[in-house]
Image: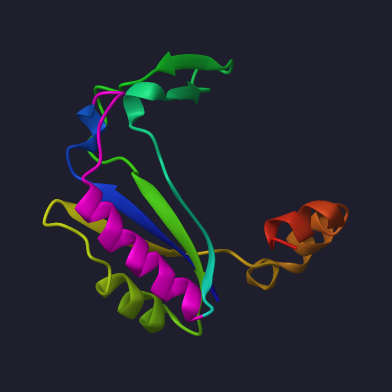
Amino acid sequence: MRFMMLMIPLGYETAAPDVQLDPERVTAMMKYNEALNEAGILIALDGLHPPSMGARVSFSSGKPIVTDGPFTEAKEVLGGYWMIDVKSREEAIAWAKKCPASENEIIEIRQVQEMADFSEEVQEAASKFPELQSKARGR
């Protein structure tokens, strides 16, 4: 089962584009990342620049509208993610609990949808694009 662990650092929604990371925190996080990798469950991970460097494309008017960051209405934003492959939701939670997160960070755990989760009609529609299915699985 694949899960995304989404890091939500409270306050990151207002971080400046040139926000600096604490080297000690980076070292602790890299040791955690190394443990995920050594356990054979790490698929991918990345940190994300703050929203002040991002953009949102919305479609509420039926046409794409681009809004540059920061986003005044944002209360929680992603700071990064890990994609892991574990046997259960409980195992994903156990790994998240080992993260050296600080008191202003939250990890949200979300299971990745697999083709088997969908109806036969949806699976049939997706089967017409096998090259995209293999990319989605990282193959």
Q: Is residue 44 visible?
A: yes
Q: Position of residue 84 (x, y in %)?
A: 50, 69
For the magenta stretch, what is the residue range? 16-39
Q: Does 22 appear in magenta?
A: yes
In the rendered structure, the answer to whether residue 123 lies left or right of residue 31 reads right
| 74 lies above or below 120 | above
> Between 116 and 76, which is closer to the camera in this rendering?
76
In the rendered structure, the answer to whether residue 119 lies left or right of residue 38 reads right
In the rendered structure, the answer to whether residue 131 lies left or right of residue 41 reads right
Q: Is residue 107 visible?
A: no
Identity of the residue drawn at 77% across and 63% down: 123
Q: Main secondary structure of the magenta part?
A: helix
Identity of the residue drawn at 26% across and 62% down: 28
Q: Quadrant of residue 76?
A: top left
> Between 113 and 51, which is closer to the camera in this rendering?
51
Q: Does 101 appear in magenta?
A: no
Q: Residue furthest left?
A: 103
Q: Quadrant of residue 55?
A: top left
| 53 lies above or below 90 | above
Quadrant of the drawing holding the C terminus: bottom right
Q: Position of residue 67 (x, y in %)?
A: 42, 16
Identity of the residue drawn at 31% across and 23% down: 17
Identity of the residue drawn at 52% across and 76% down: 41
Q: Position of residue 60 (x, y in %)?
A: 49, 22
Q: Position of residue 114 (x, y in %)?
A: 64, 67
Q: Residue furthest right?
A: 128
Quadrant of the drawing holding the N terminus: bottom right
Numbered disc total: 0
Looking at the image, what colour scheme do you see?
A: rainbow
